[in-house]
Image: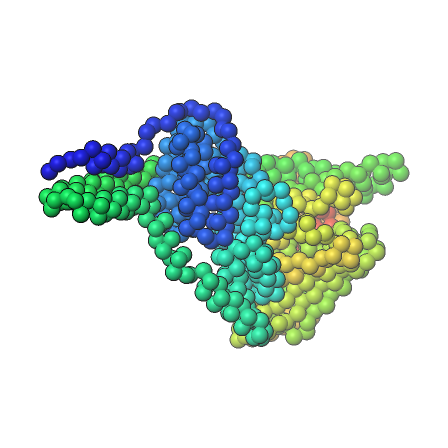
Amino acid sequence: MTWRLPHILLFYLGIALLFPLEKTQGQETIIIDPDFHQLITEARAYKNQDKMDLALKALEEAAEWAEDNENERAAIQTQNMFAEVYLIRGEVDRATSSFIQARNLLEDNTYNEGSAYYLLVDAQLTLENDSLKLYTTALQTVLDAKRTNNNRNLLNRAALLEGRIFELMNRPDSAIIRYNSLRGDNADPYEKDYLRSAAHLSLAQLYASQEKVSEAIANAESALEIAKTNEFQREYAESNQLLAKLYRQTGQFQKALESVENMLFLRDSIYTVEKLEMESEISEGVFARQTIEQQKKYEAEIAELSESASRSEITAILTSAFLTIISLLAVSLYRNNQIKLKTNDLLQTKNRELQLARDAAVQAMEAKTNFLSTVSHELRTPLYAVTGLTHLLLEENPRKNQLEHLKALKFSGDYLLNFINDILQINKIDADKLEPLEVECNLKKVLTDVINGLQQSAKDHKNEIILDYDPQIPAHLMSDPVKLSQVFMNLIGNALKFTREGEVVVIAKLLKKDGNYANIYFEVRDNGIGIDKERQATIFDSFEQGSIQINREYGGTGLGLTIVKSLLGLFGSKIQLESELGKGSSFFFELNMKCKDELVDDIPFEISPNDYQYKGLHLLVVEDNKINQVITKKMLSKKEITCDIANNGMEAVELAGKNTYDGILMDIHMPGISGVEATEQIRKFDPETPIIALTAISLDDSLEAFYAAGCNDVVTKPFKPEVFYEKIGENIIEPKMRKSYT
C-alpha cells in the first residue's frame, strides 16, 4: 500500500485531536476576552432555555478558545459548565469526565471562583446516588462552595441546590426558606430570572406534595409567567403540567385544559426533526464528530480520484481511511476506559473523605450537645439560690428602695431561667432525646391550666385571654399533656408579649372524628403588633424574633417558636402563620389524637390554689446542697410546713422507713445513690406517700424515667415559688381532700 503525504497528515491530525498539547501551568490572572465571555453567556442562556444542543456548541467553541489562548481558568469554567449541561441531559458519565478534567486543572491553579463552582458540580454528582447519608455529604459540599467564594450567582445557585437537598432529606421547612430567598429581586448578574422561575416552581411542587393547593397554584403561576417571558422551556412545561393537575383538583377545568394545550404546543415546537438531528450530532461529542468529518473527507477524495486513479489506488485510500478510523475509535475507547478507572478511584477516595468528615461532624455535634447540657445543668443550682433568696426577701416587707432592686433581680433571674430552659429543650430535640408520650389527657384542662398560669402576664399588659373550646371534642384523648402545655405556653406567652390592651383568642375545634381518632384544629390569635412579610419566613428559626428595637422593647430569647415548631414535629404536625403588620398574628396547626371515649369522666372536683391548707404538713426534703436546704426549708416555713432534711439518697430511704411523712421532695442528682434509685427503694415499702422530684434536669434526664421510678410529679430547679407551692398542693394536699370528699 502506498501512503501519500495527505493520508499521513490526516492520520496524525486525528491522533493530535485526541491528545491535546500541555498548557501553561500556574496561571494567576485571567483576561476576560469579549469573545469568550460572549460564548459562556450564550451557553448559560441556552442551558436555562433547555436548548442543550446550542449550549454544548457554544461550550465547545469556548473550550477551543481556552485551548488556543492557553487560559486554564477559562478551561476550568468551561468544563464546570460542560458537567452541568451533561447532568441536566442525564449523561452522568460525560458529566463525570468533565468534572475530572476541571479537577485536574484546579490541582495546578489557585482559582477560588472555579473551585466553588466545581464543588457545586461535586454536590450534584453526589446526589446522583440516592442515599440519605450522601445527602448530608452533598449539603456539606455546598457549604464548602459558599465558603470558597461569595459570588452572588454562586450563592443563589447554592441556595437552589440546598433547597433540593433539604427536600430529599425530608426537611421541607428548610427547603422553603432557601427557595423563598430566590423569589424576590436580587443582584444576580446572570441568572436572576431563571433562578426566580426555578424557585417558584420548586415551591409549587413542594406545596403540592403537602396538599397546600392555593400556595402551589400561586407559585406555579409565577414560575410559568417568568418562564414564558424568558423562554425557559423546561420550567414552562413543568409549570403547565403541575397547573393542569392542580386546576383539575380545584374544579377549574377550563384553566386545566389551557395548561394541557400549552404543553402540547411546546412539545410540537421543540421536538422538530432539525433539533433532533442537531442534538444527535452534538451528543456524540468531539471524538465522534471528528471521526465523521474525517470519513467525509476521505469520501470526497475517493470521488475525486475515481475518474483518474486505478482500482488499486482507490483500494489503498480506502484502506488508509479505514485504518485511521479504527485507530481513532480504538484510542477513544482506551481513553474512555482510563477515565472510568480514574473516576472509580476518585469516587472511592471521595467516599472515604466524606465518611471521615461525617464522623467528625457527628463528634462535633455530640460535643456541642454535651457542653450545652452540662452548662445548663450547672447553672441551675446557683440560680436556684438567686431566685429562692429573692423570693424570700420580697416576702419580708423590704424597704421601698430595696423593693425596686429586688424586683429587678427577680426579673433577671426569671429571664435567665427561661433562657436556660429553652436552650435545654432545643438541645434535647436536636439530640433526638425527646419522644412524645401517649397517655390519657384532658385537653380542656391542659388549655385551662396554661391560660390560668399566664393570667398575671396578661394583666401586666391589660390583655384578655379567651378560650373558644369546641364541646364536640372528646373528653378523653391520648397524647402528651406536658409537651402540649409547652406548645401552648410558648404560643400564648408569645402572643401576650407582643400585644398591648388587646385580646388573645385560643381556639380548639374538632374538624372530624374518624373511628378512634379525632382531627383537632388549634389556633392562637392576637391583635398585637403583627409580623412583617420578610420576618415570617425565618420567625421559627432559633434566635429569630424581630428587629433589635422590638427585642429590646418586648424581651424574649427568640427560642419559643423554634421549640413550638420542633415539638409539633414530634407529633407529626406543622405550625403555620398568618400575620399582618399592625393588625396581629395567627398561629395554627392540626393534631390527630386517639380517643378514649369509653372512659368515665372524673368526678367534678375543682380546688383553687387559694384553698390549699399547708399548715400542719410534715415533709421529707432530700437535698445534698446546703444552700438549697436552707432556702427550701425557709420557703416551706412560710406556709407553716415542717420538714426533715436528708443529705443523700441512702439517708432518705432510712428516714422514710422510720417515719411517716405527708410527702417527700426528692432531689435527683446526689452522691451515692441517685434520687431515682432512692425513690425505687422507697416504693418497695411505701407505695402511697407522694414523691415530688426536684431536679436541675439535664440532657440525659428523662421525665418518663422519673415517673416510672414512682415519682408523682417533677419540678425543675430553679423553680418559681408559686409553682413549687402549687405542686405541693396538687400532689399532697389535693389527694387528701379528694379522699375526704368521697
Residue name at image x 32 percent, y 40 percent:
343
- Looking at the rendered structure, the number of numbered marks drawn on it comes to 0
Q: Residue pushed farthest front?
A: 308
**Viewer-closest of 100 and 661:** 100
Q: Where does the image place residue 199, in percent across and percent down from the top left?
A: 56, 53
Q: Is residue 678 visible?
A: no
**Viewer-closest of 205 and 294:** 294
Residue name at image x 34 percent, y 27 percent:
22
Tell me the quadrant of the picture where the C terminus can be found: bottom right
Q: Is residue 150 visible?
A: yes
Residue name at image x 33 percent, y 43 percent:
286
**Viewer-closest of 180 and 491:** 180
Q: Where does the image place residue 654, in percent across and percent down from the top left?
A: 55, 45
- In the image, residue 691 above or below residue 83: below
Q: Quadrant of residue 254?
A: bottom right
Q: Quadrant of residue 444?
A: bottom right
| Colour setup of the view | rainbow
Q: Where does the image place residue 666, in percent across and percent down from the top left?
A: 60, 46
- In the image, residue 245 above or below residue 619: below
